[in-house]
Amino acid sequence: VVGAEVCFTIQAPGLAPIPLTPCATSDANGRASADYTFSNSWKSTGPGTILVTVALPVGEPLSGSTGFTVKEKP
């Protein structure tokens, strides 16, 4: 969807959910992205989730999630 509001939330091990603000607006291809850098003092490892919510011009928002794994640096 072009021009939709897309909000990202990171749920990383050992941290409260991190909403990435401001939300992004999808581009001419219907894509949106966000960047986040964890603090160097954060040392947790394990599974996490990225939640994406898309506010559509009409109807209810859509949401989806994907998992990721945090590993120690080699």
Image: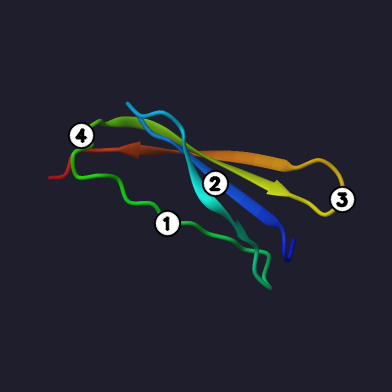
Q: For mark 1, what is the residue?
A: 35
Callout 3 amino acid = Val
* Distance between the alpha carbons at the discs numbered 3 and 2: 20 Å
Place of residue 12 in the rendered image (x, y in percent of width and height, measured from the top left): 38, 34
Residue at 69 percent across and 48 percent down: it is 54
Callout 2 amino acid = Phe
Q: Do the residues under discs 3 and 1 have CB atoms within 8 angstroms?
A: no
First in sequence: mark 4 vs mark 1: 1
Q: For mark 3, what is the residue?
A: 58
Residue at 73 percent across and 66 percent down: it is 2
Place of residue 41 in the rendered image (x, y in percent of width and height, measured from the top left): 18, 39
Q: For mark 4, what is the residue?
A: 43
Relative to residue 40, is residue 64 drawn left or right?
right
Place of residue 71 in the rendered image (x, y in percent of width and height, measured from the top left): 24, 38
Relative to residue 64, is residue 37 drawn left or right?
left
* Distance between the alpha carbons at the discs numbered 4 and 1: 19 Å
Q: In which quadrant of the rendered view does residue 73 lie?
A: top left
Callout 4 secondary element: loop
* Distance between the alpha carbons at the discs numbered 3 and 1: 27 Å
Q: For mark 2, what is the residue?
A: 8
* Distance between the alpha carbons at the discs numbered 4 and 3: 42 Å
Residue at 81 percent across and 40 percent down: it is 60
Q: Do the residues under discs 4 and 1 have CB atoms within 8 angstroms?
A: no
Q: Quadrant of the C terminus?
A: top left
Q: Is residue 16 above or below residue 55?
A: above
Callout 4 amino acid = Lys
